[in-house]
Image (tube, helix red, strand yellow):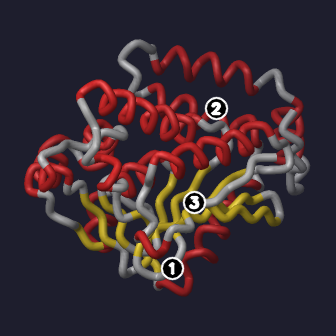
Amino acid sequence: MAIFENLLLNQQNGILTITINRADKLNALNIETIREIRNAMQQVYDDASIKGAIITGAGAKAFVAGADITEIAELSEVTARSFAERGQEVFAMIERSNKPVIAAVNGFALGGGCELAMACHIRVASESARFGQPEVNLGLIPGYGGTQRLTQLVGKGKAMELMMTADMVTAPEALQLGLVNHVVPQEELMSKSVEIMEKIMGKAPLAIGLVIECVNAVFNKDENGYQTEANAFARCCTSEDFVEGTSAFMEKRKANFTGN
């Protein structure tokens, strides 16, 4: 069992809530926290009792207000490349998880925090949340996949503007841009995230995982997304959940999916 110093993990009713617990640092991502997020996601991958994960930040101010500047200031060209690649690898684990991952964005999601939220499959934001990629203020660019995912989510022109001006956007603006899925009052953030997760968990787990795989294939230049979809569709048709789902529909009853 992994030991966590910078994360709080709580599993309830199949949902693992991962809380970045560095409120005094506005939950900034240091190297150790990135490592712990990887370990937490490995639990999501490996533990069959976990059906999905919600990632959030401790305190009322920040989801994650960026990376740890004290560590970044010490980087050289060689160490900076490995620093970025390590973060990209961990965030790719989130994006490629065949179990749903929801970001419950409770405050500032800046730099690495915005990148972490974008790696999740769905984003729910509190009304006070703020999003941005302010790295150019430090003479840097996003390094954890932000240049790629922000462009995918909001389009080339707006992504260019946000990354070159370092402007922050409010939660309502983020909703309008398609950066987040829902905006709710702060006190409803976790309940809304759980509500969405429970709705997803009521569907066929294999199909959910294959939806994630196929949607990700849209952005993989080396993959034929249509063929990935056809293969996944065929895979679904070999599953027990397919038999259960179609039978339940015809029998006008609720399906009981097992993930097989």
Position of residue 185 measured from the top left corner of the image (x, y, whole percent) = 46, 85
Q: Give the secondary structure at mark 3.
A: strand
Instruction: Return the residue at label 2.
Output: 210
Tell me the amino acid under the disc marked 3.
Ile
Q: Residue at x 89, y 39 (%)?
A: 244
Q: Earlier in the sequence, mark 3 or mark 2?
A: 3
Q: Nearer the viewer, mark 3 or mark 1?
A: 1
Q: Amino acid at mark 1?
A: Gly
**Where's residue 31, x and y in %?**
47, 46
Q: Residue at x 56, y 82 (%)?
A: 188
Residue position marked by numbered label 3 in the rendering: 55
Q: Is residue 98 left or right of residue 182?
A: right
Closer to the camera, 242 or 205? 205
**Marks 3 and 1 close (CB-CB < 8 Å):** no
Q: Quadrant of the C terminus?
A: top right
In the image: residue 168, left or right of residue 3: left
Up-down relation of residue 77 to residue 254 (above or below): above
Separation of marks 3 and 1 at Cα, in angstroms: 13 Å
